[in-house]
Amino acid sequence: MLMLQSKLFTKTRREDPKDEQAKNAKLLIRAGFINKEMAGAYDLLPLGLRVVEKIKSIVREEMEKLGSQEILMTSIQRKDVWEKTGRWSDEVVDVWFKSALQVGGEVGFGWSHEEPIGDMMRNYILSFRDLPFSVYQFQTKLRNEVRAKSGIMRGREFMMKDMYSFSLGKEDHDRFYAAAIEAYNKVFARVGIGADTFVTFAAGGAFTKFSHEFQTITEAGEDAIYLNREKNIAINEEVLNDETLASLGVKREDLEKVSTAEVGNVFNFGTEKGEALGLFFKDQSGESIPVWMGSYGIGITRLMGVLVEKFSDEKGIIWPKSVAPFDAHIIVIGGMDSEAMIAANKLTETLEARGVEILLDDREASAGEKFSDADLFGIPTRIVISPKTLEEGKLEVKDRATGEVKKISEEELVSLF
Amino acid sequence: MLMLQSKLFTKTRREDPKDEQAKNAKLLIRAGFINKEMAGAYDLLPLGLRVVEKIKSIVREEMEKLGSQEILMTSIQRKDVWEKTGRWSDEVVDVWFKSALQVGGEVGFGWSHEEPIGDMMRNYILSFRDLPFSVYQFQTKLRNEVRAKSGIMRGREFMMKDMYSFSLGKEDHDRFYAAAIEAYNKVFARVGIGADTFVTFAAGGAFTKFSHEFQTITEAGEDAIYLNREKNIAINEEVLNDETLASLGVKREDLEKVSTAEVGNVFNFGTEKGEALGLFFKDQSGESIPVWMGSYGIGITRLMGVLVEKFSDEKGIIWPKSVAPFDAHIIVIGGMDSEAMIAANKLTETLEARGVEILLDDREASAGEKFSDADLFGIPTRIVISPKTLEEGKLEVKDRATGEVKKISEEELVSLF
């Protein structure tokens, strides 16, 4: 896959946008990955959309391994469904966007899909034979946030992967819940934040003492966790009390407070939602039993923001290889018909045949401008082809993460991918 | 790619849903491809989502061949942008969903993205060097429709591929517009409705006598066109007048009126939007010139509905091969440890290795139920493996479209894919 930079409609900016405080928004806007519609609502431009699709692919792979089935719920939601659990009220849920229907009545725009999916499953779960299973979706959530100052880390509109499990009972539920935590750990490891992401004890509900959040260490986070690195135990502020400490066997003085961003969460509803929504199954004796439900979220666009916060320097973004918009950024120093361009086209063909995704900077621009844009974009491997490298018979290859520059042969380069 | 039908959470229904009039909704709901949230708003379930993704892939390929760049705009939109063209008003646009922001002010939910994209491009189009280009997206549109009775063919929420072109002037614009029409024709041919889809003259704007719609013949359509098949000329009702007839060189008496559904449209804004939105570029002499804009839509979920309307019989759906959720539906007659199941697993491996996408009916159900579900699902090739076929040393292969049943060897079957 090849994209010619001369055809890319986006532009880079040298200056930070004045209306952004968050590093993730500043860098992503400067690099032309996103465009701001309003606070908390950003368009995904070609390079940004590519990163989001890479993240989605990783998440999708891990959810499929769990046996989860992909669906796509509507954004428009019914009032009667949310009334069943008492969450239609703006006093209970303070982020609703609602609108009147022309034909009468009101609709809400999905800030969550817990209630609609439980309601929907009444059509598909009848007997114990239909359980257990889980479904997931990549869905745009809409939230009427008062505060939206963290760039793409807290949005009025953002992309979320939400998954829901439907189980026969506690044992069945617990098995899936544990597998989901494992799958989430794999996702965060694969996108490069495994070492800094902690499964964190958070407030539970009627059926569990705790729920679990996935908190990633970053100064830009809006959360804080209390961490015992040795025991690998992390506790959310809201449940940090003597009872929690005793039950987890840790002491307050052994905990380190760190700033974090929540990149995922898993929650056990027990039979609470099933009972409220009327989601029951018939067991072997014909008795009606409420379905156990769990809910599992990963903030896809937030994750992109967290990656920028963690992996960037004064020159720009440093994408982990697994989610970079391209594998290689080839910079040509020379005009359209130059020997450098001819060599670059040849190299591109060779790499493309190996499945390498390439952004080729074929623009008529100065070397300085090209290098500075490349640093801003943060593609892992930068390859320079210039009259000088041609003369030397080597390619100049820079690792964006380490800054290391090597002069290597084409054969050596090809073997890197 | 393999899906086990025993794991699929959806269920088929024998009875039509009582609250649907449209054949597309009846069949898609009965087959478990979609679920109804409310009139005009349907969830995409695993099989339905697979069809939508197949359609999207075809559209994406053709848009990429045009050189168009994929993006994703927000659903939330600003009032001030739409006020510039006078289209914020509910009296001008009668399908707005709007909602108050908690921080003050109002947002609209995207029923179209013409204005926001023109506004956004002010950040990226500065000079003649930045033109021409085009962008496209797959976006969920929200429309506060009064009438939503055509199933997924007219939705309050639906998926659209919208594309926008930005050109230097008329000549530049016309070139892309013609190429887009060609690309659209390819899309409709590839999804199987090429012969029944007509580029139709429709109302133009300030800059053109006509715009063009892509109208597909179907009794379920809400539109009508006047067609001269011999000359391959189709005219929309709204522009059917003496002047149009004279300019196109056709006579009223030679036109046949047919029911159609609009599956796509292309529109030339000239400089109208650019001027209203302040989207100008500097030409070589430094003068500010308004950008020419064009808009190009394909209703992705509507297209799915049209396919069901056109390709179905009393037993169910008959998907064209290019968009079917799976290539092959393997039906096993026999239990989990039966010889039939062992043979089916072996065949599945062989086919998967060739890239065939398979739905394997491994359920404990009667042969009759399995056959009737297979007909309802409409996967192009049905393969039966039973004690009888094993004894004969042949597979029973049915073509869903023609109904033809053949007994062939595994080698012959494999060579079909």
Image (cartoon, coloured by chain):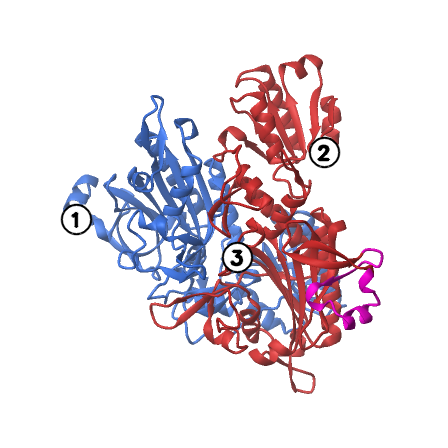
Chain colours: A red, B blue
Name the mark nearer the viewer: 2 or 1: 2
- Residue A269 lies in what quarter of the image? bottom right
**Of the image marks 2 and 3, the number of the one nearer the N terminus:** 3
From the image, tell me which residue sits under label 2.
A417
Residue B86 in percent (x, y) is at 28, 50
Using the image, name the chain to which the residue with label 3 belongs.
Answer: A
On screen, residue B269 above or below B154: above
Which amino acid does the dot numbered 1 rest on? Asn
Q: Is residue B362 visible?
A: no
* Residue drawn at 43 percent across, 76 percent down: B18
Q: Are marks 3 and 1 on the same chain?
A: no
Query: Crowding at label 2, few (<14), some or many (≥20) Cα neighbours within 10 Å?
Result: few
Would residue A28 appear left or right of B241 to someone viewing this image?
A: right
Query: Crowding at label 1, few (<14), some or many (≥20) Cα neighbours within 10 Å?
Result: few
Residue B78 in percent (x, y) is at 40, 52
Residue B357 in percent (x, y) is at 62, 53
From the image, tell me which residue sits under label 3.
A147
Using the image, name the chain to which the residue with label 2 belongs.
Answer: A
Q: What residue range appears in magenta?
A: A229-253
On screen, residue A168 above or below A303: below
